[in-house]
Image (cartoon, helix red, strand yellow):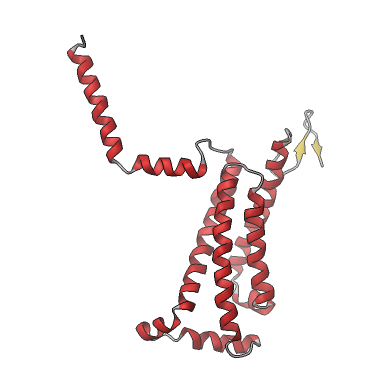
Amino acid sequence: MMTDAEREDKERIKREKMRKLESPLPFVLVFRNWIFGKKRPDLYTRLVFYTNLFIWFIFTIWSGFSYFALVSRDWVRQQKGIDVGKMIEARSSELGFEPGNFLVRLEFSNFVALICWMLFFLGLVLLYRKKKIFAYFTLVPLATYVIINVFYLGFSYFIEDITLFDKILLLISALSLIAISFMIRGESQGEAANFFGLTQDEDGGEMT
């Protein structure tokens, strides 16, 4: 036989479980654990992850907004009175493109950019889980994004139309991801890695 106190505790625990099930928080936690796993990585990995997550958010929002503005330029002109196509054509002539050519290239490059940043996010998930393959899903899309802006849209476009702030973010992302890639590779081989990605032997000496 349960005492009144035990029965009250049982009812209280039952009510608390019901409240948790009614809250969306458990489902959010389950979804988060399903993507990122239950184990938190080390501090430096988390620092690189959150830094690049911020960079991913900025570029994804910008690429998405740009692509929407390009494919919906007729709607924007009708609803807002802003002729996006005319502004782009004016800029394209300054960059030395033939009429209509730059607009097509810009629309395609933003579409590719969205794919790159989706793959980049997948790479960040793998980074958080400390999977060595993360480098392919982050550095390759990052390099593709830079290459398409430099060679497909032109070096002048990259220099003049890509802001210094964006270039700094891309550089920070590339350097941090390369460094953490060496560290994770060293850890997988049973070697201790320092902040700069150099491995250390048991006596504390640096190894190449």
Which of the 4 image quadrants contains residue 155?
A: bottom right
Query: Number of numbered discs present?
Result: 0
Image position, residue 174 (x, y; %): 66, 57
Which residue sits at x=52%, y=56%?
54
Inspect this view and state whether residue 193 appears.
no
Q: Is residue 109 left or right of residue 187?
A: left
Instruction: Residue at 56%, 61% (x, y): give it.
Output: 117
In this picture, residue 27 sits left or right of residue 206: left
Q: Is residue 124 above or below residue 142?
A: above
Choose between 157 and 185: the one closer to the eye. 185
Q: Where does the image place residue 163, in percent across and percent down from the top left?
A: 59, 71
Q: Farthest left residue?
A: 4
Where does the image place residue 17, in percent across and percent down from the top left?
Answer: 29, 31
Relative vertical location of residue 52 with respect to residue 9 in this rendering, above or below: below
Residue drawn at point x = 61 percent, y = 89 percent: 93
- At 27% from the left and 40% from the top, the residue drawn is 22
**Viewer can see residue 126:** yes
Q: Which of the 4 image quadrants contains residue 139?
A: bottom right
For residue 50, side relative to residue 81 (left or right): right
Residue 192 versus residue 127 in the image, above or below: above
Q: Quadrant of the C terminus?
A: top right
Image coords of residue 45 (percent x, y)? 60, 43
Q: Quadrant of the N terminus?
A: top left
Horizontal side of 105 relative to 189 (left or right) equals left
